[in-house]
Every structure is written in structure tokens, then in C-alpha cells.
Amino acid sequence: MKDFIDDAKIQTLLEEARDPDPSEIREILAKARSKKRLEPEETAKLLQVEDPELLEEIFQLAGELKKAIYGNRIVFFAPLYIGNKCINNCLYCGFRNSNNAIDRVTLSMEELEREVITLEKEGHKRLILVYGEHPDYDADFICKTMEVVYNTKIENGEIRRVNINAAPMDVEDYKKLLDTGIGTFQIFQETYHHKTYSLLHPAGDRKADYQWRLYGLDRAMEAGIDDVGIGALFGLYDWKFEVLGLLYHSIHLEERFGVGPHTISVPRIEPALNTPFYRNNKYHVSDQDFKKLVAILRLSVPYTGLILTARENAEIRKEVIPLGVTQIDAGSRIGIGAYSKSQALLPEKEQFQLGDIRSLDEVIGELAEQGYVPSFCTAGYRCGRTGEYFMKLAKTGLVQNYCLPNALLTFKEYLEDFASEKTREIGERLIRENLEEIGKKDPARRNFVEEKLQLIAQGARDIYI
Ligand code: SF4
């Protein structure tokens, strides 16, 4: 397969984009405002903007675009680490095979059930299951864990969407996941820069094969999984290069399958137990550059969801969410088995250190106070609004007809079943305000949504449109 990441070309684009002309930048912003995907040459110019006034315009527009396409809802999920065995030796990772400080564990099906019940009691409806790369974690094992997650239910608690972050597979294995009801399959390239990739992934390891990983999501899509997620681990190489790598990856999927990635994740490297790489690293991304890269991604691929995780601390999340983020996790625990043990941190069982260990309720309360509607919606994939069909709805703005009502309905469920008194109060007010807004544009729609909300207040669950 042709390698669609051309390092020399990316470097040249960045070189040529230095000291961009403000009028040219404003033309690019005008194009972004019309919700058109940007070309790499245009994104490269945005990446080279240093002027504070122009940067402010970029930040402003990123927030506006997110609102115009997705509204004021933020989707919530939780990560669930299934096992930390790994055959690879990625230098930056706490789970690398040679790291003897890590306690190697894989959840038994009973332990997995306990983790899921704990998450359901918090109010979660969407999970991403995470696995190291190991023969024990093959497609059959992953399917078994997905089944356990879907089948574990408590009163008013169930997981309705399971996403997967695991090693790249072949088409036949992806088909097994599809048959078991996968939501999104996620693979992060880590770094798109070939030389850095070779340095960080020792020869002989499965992961050393850059191309196998790069085409991992092509095979998922060939198998019929039409929601895929890409990402880069920011801080392994020049962040501007990685943004262009992500853009080229999106363009490749768009050209080949008619639809780009469903989501882009922007993890920044964090310290991990017994992992000196972090201390000696020279590519750390500053908070200001991090904000810039999120905003520029928002402008470059307007219809792709952006995921910001609890790797980041609460302060940074507060600053970055308004720049176009569509999904976050909260109440996250990443030590294997940490949810049911109520342990926020389990360093010897974690891949890296988490930055935001607040509870789901606390994060939801804070966001609702700021006017964001927390959403646990899983309707899209259960109604077949995925892949190319989802993109069509997003591009015509129709997705908002579903997104906001479904966000309100799932938020209402959360408030009824799991929220603290304080969050419930803030949430009910927010729901009323949003209903009023809907009513100003479309009174019939407001009545329709209000009826459904009343049904939830009377005890009905899992209502979606
Ligand atoms: S990054 Fe993934 S593949 Fe690499 S060592 Fe860590 S768990 Fe294994």
C-alpha cells in the first residue's frame, strides 16, 4: 500500500508557511467558517500563526464552528482498561514489556462485571475498552469482553455503546467485532513522523511496523466498521507535524471510503511509572500550543469529533473544551480494576498518570453550570446514523435535530437516576433553558421533546430519536 504520509512534504509545507500574511490567514478562516475541510497547505499556515490577535480569531472561530455543527452538547464516556500485558516496548509507555515495575493483570470476566456495575452506578452509558497488544487479547477475547459489558445491567444502568482501543487487526477479526456490536474502533498512530516512529518502537516488535498500523483503520472500514477514531500522542515529535499527519490521515480515509474518521483524539504524553522517557523528552507541548492545535484541528476537519481526555488536568480541560471539543471522559480510573476498588490512582497498574480525577458528577455539574449539555447519547449508532450517513446529516446541519434532543433526554435520565442534588438543580435549569431555545425556533419540536422528558420523569428509560 502507498504510504500517504510524506515526511519531506510536510516539512516543506511547514517551512513555506512561516510568517504567514494576515490577509491570507483571514481568507483561510473565512473558508473554515463556511465549514469546508481545509487543505494541508492551509492548515500549515494556521499552524505558523504567532500573532496574538490572529490566534484569538482562530480560538473564537473554533468555538463558533463547534457550536454551529454540534450545538452545545458534550458527549461523556469512560475508559475501561481490560489488561496491561503487552509484547511491545514503546519507549514512552508504562505498559511496555520490559517495564518490571508494572503489575501485569487482566480482568477476569467476574472482575470485568464488577467494573461495569461500578461504572453503571455512576451513570455511564458509553465505554471505551482498552487492551495492550498481546496474544491473550485477540479478537475472540475482545468480543467476549464486549458481550460481558453489554450483558451486565443494573436497574436503570446499562452500557449502550462499547468502543474499542486495541492493536490493529486483520479484516476477518474486525468482522467479529462488528458482529458483536462495536461502536468505534480507535487506533492512534502515536507519531506520524517515520524516523521518530522507528526510534520509539524497537525493531522486531509488532508495533515497529508503521504501515500495518497506518492502514489498521482501512482494514476496519473494509470489514464494515464505519466509525473509526484516529489520534497522535502529542509530545513524541513536533506537534505541528502531527497535526498535518492527522489531517493527511483524515483525507486518506475520506478519499478511500467517502468518509473521514469519526473522531480525532489529542492525548498529550504524561509521566508513567519507571518510564524515564518523559523526563528526557524534548518535544513536550506547552499549554498554549495545545490550545492552538485543538482549535486548528477543529477548523481543519469541521465534521470530525474531537476527544479531550482526563489525561489533562481540570484547569486545562476548562480552557480547551470551548475550542471545539465534542467528547470527554470523566470519573475515569485507568488502573486495571480501579473502578470497583474505588482507587483513583494505581500507579503499578496504569499506563500513565491521569490529570483529572474528579467524579463524573463533579465534571457534569461544572459543565452544565457553563451551559454545556452533557450527553450520554448512543442513538446515532443504534439507529444506523454512522459513517457516511452521519457525515451527510452533519453537513446539512440536520444532526442537530437529533443531537440536542437526545442529549437532553439522556441528561434527564442521568439527573433522575444518578446526579447529586446540586447537579440536579443546575441540570433541570439547563434543560428548561434549552427547551425554551428549541421552542423559539420550532414550537412543535419543543413539545415533542418535552413530552419525552416527562415520560422519563415518570420512569421510562432509553428514549431516543
Ligand atoms: S503503547 Fe500500547 S503497544 Fe506500546 S507498550 Fe504501551 S500498551 Fe504496548
Image (spheres, rainbow, N blue to C red):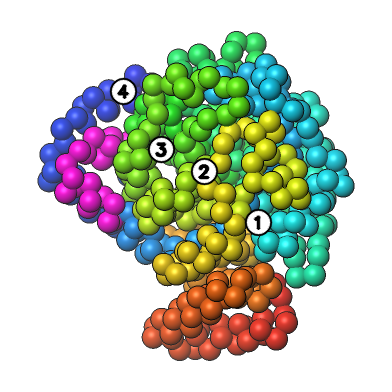
Location of residue 297 with respect to 94 vertically, above or below:
below
Q: CA distance from mark 3 to mark 1?
A: 26 Å
Tag of residue 11: 4
Q: Earlier in the sequence, mark 3 or mark 2?
A: 3
Q: Amino acid at mark 4?
A: Gln
Position of residue 178 measured from the top left corner of the image (x, y, whole percent): 72, 47
Q: Residues within 10 Å of mark 1 (few under 14, many from 20)?
A: many
Tell me the distance, in whole angstroms, between the alpha carbons under discs 3 and 2.
27 Å
Which of discs 3 and 1 lies nearer the camera? The answer is 1
Q: Mostly what secondary structure, the magenta segment?
A: helix
Q: Nearer the viewer, mark 2 or mark 4?
A: 2
Dot 3 corresponds to which residue?
Answer: 247
How many numbered marks have been drawn onto this rendered protein structure? 4
Q: Is residue 217 above or below residue 14?
A: below
Q: Looking at the image, can residue 130 be seen?
A: no
Tell which tag, 4 or 1, sits nearer the viewer.
1
Q: Point out the tag, 2 or 1, that comes first from the N-terminus.
A: 1
| C-alpha separation, residue under disc 2 versus residue under disc 4 | 32 Å
